Image (cartoon, rainbow, N blue to C red):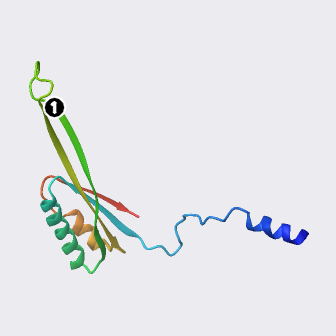
């Protein structure tokens, strides 16, 4: 009976969690996050980035669409009497994510020299 109690105590022990650590054989990659107000310009910019990376035989994952950030603003139409008359405006920020695995120096140089339209914001991280 004592042996049965010991086995239940072992089963009730906390599970061992795997630590999130970088594996020694992890592949370095570029993480490119692109943001813009207009989705058509954003998609055209992504197509240009992906064509440039594909020209140098880089492995591409994406584009992954991220949630659209919506900022809403409510403003009174007049300054004094008409409190109930209001206007609502919104700004939508569209986002995409692209990963380039094992980038060689030629790919990185080509991406830095890339000219994209105004209104497109790019964040590049080496992971």
Furthest residue in direction left, as rendered: 78
Mark count: 1
* x then y, percent, for residue 61: 32, 73
The secondary structure type at the circle numbered 1 is strand
Could you tell me which quadrant the N terminus lies in?
Answer: bottom right
* x then y, percent, for residue 30: 34, 66
Quarter-of-image position of residue 98: bottom left
Furthest residue in direction top, as rendered: 80
Q: Is residue 39 above or below residue 69?
A: below
- Going 20% across and 66% down the picture, which residue do you hit? 46
* x then y, percent, for residue 31: 34, 64
Q: Nearer the viewer, residue 36 or 28?
A: 36
Task: Locate residue 36 relative to residue 18 in the image: left or right.
Answer: left
Q: Nearer the viewer, residue 44 or 100?
A: 44
- Going 13% across and 60% down the picture, which residue do you hit? 41
Q: Is residue 65 above or below residue 58?
A: above
Could you tell me which quadrant the C terminus lies in?
Answer: bottom left
Instruction: Decide if residue 116 is in sight here.
Output: no
Task: Locate residue 76 relative to residue 126 in the image: left or right.
Answer: left
The residue identified by callout 1 is 75
Quarter-of-image position of residue 117: bottom left
Furthest residue in direction right, as rendered: 2
* Crowdedness near tag 1: few (<14), some (14–19) or many (≥20) residues, C-alpha within 10 Å: few
- Going 20% across and 37% down the picture, which residue do you hit? 73
Q: Nearer the viewer, residue 38 or 90?
A: 90
Instruction: Decide if residue 39 is in sight here.
Output: yes
* x then y, percent, for residue 92: 20, 50
- Going 62% across and 64% down the picture, which residue do you hit? 17
Q: Is residue 91 above or below residue 18?
A: above
Task: Locate residue 95 relative to residue 26 in the image: left or right.
Answer: left
């Amino acid at each position: 009976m004592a042996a049965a109690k010991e086995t239940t105590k072992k089963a009730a022990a906390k599970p061992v969690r795997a630590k999130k650590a970088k594996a020694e054989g992890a592949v370095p990659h570029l993480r490119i996050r692109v943001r813009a107000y207009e989705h058509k310009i954003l998609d055209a910019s992504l197509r240009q980035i992906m064509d440039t990376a594909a020209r140098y035989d880089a492995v591409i994952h994406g584009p992954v669409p991220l949630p659209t950030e919506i900022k809403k603003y409510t403003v009174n139409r007049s300054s004094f009497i008409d409190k109930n008359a209001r206007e609502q405006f919104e700004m939508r920020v569209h986002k995409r994510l692209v990963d380039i695995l094992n980038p060689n120096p030629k790919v990185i140089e080509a991406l830095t020299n890339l000219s994209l339209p105004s209104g497109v914001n790019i964040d590049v991280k080496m992971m």
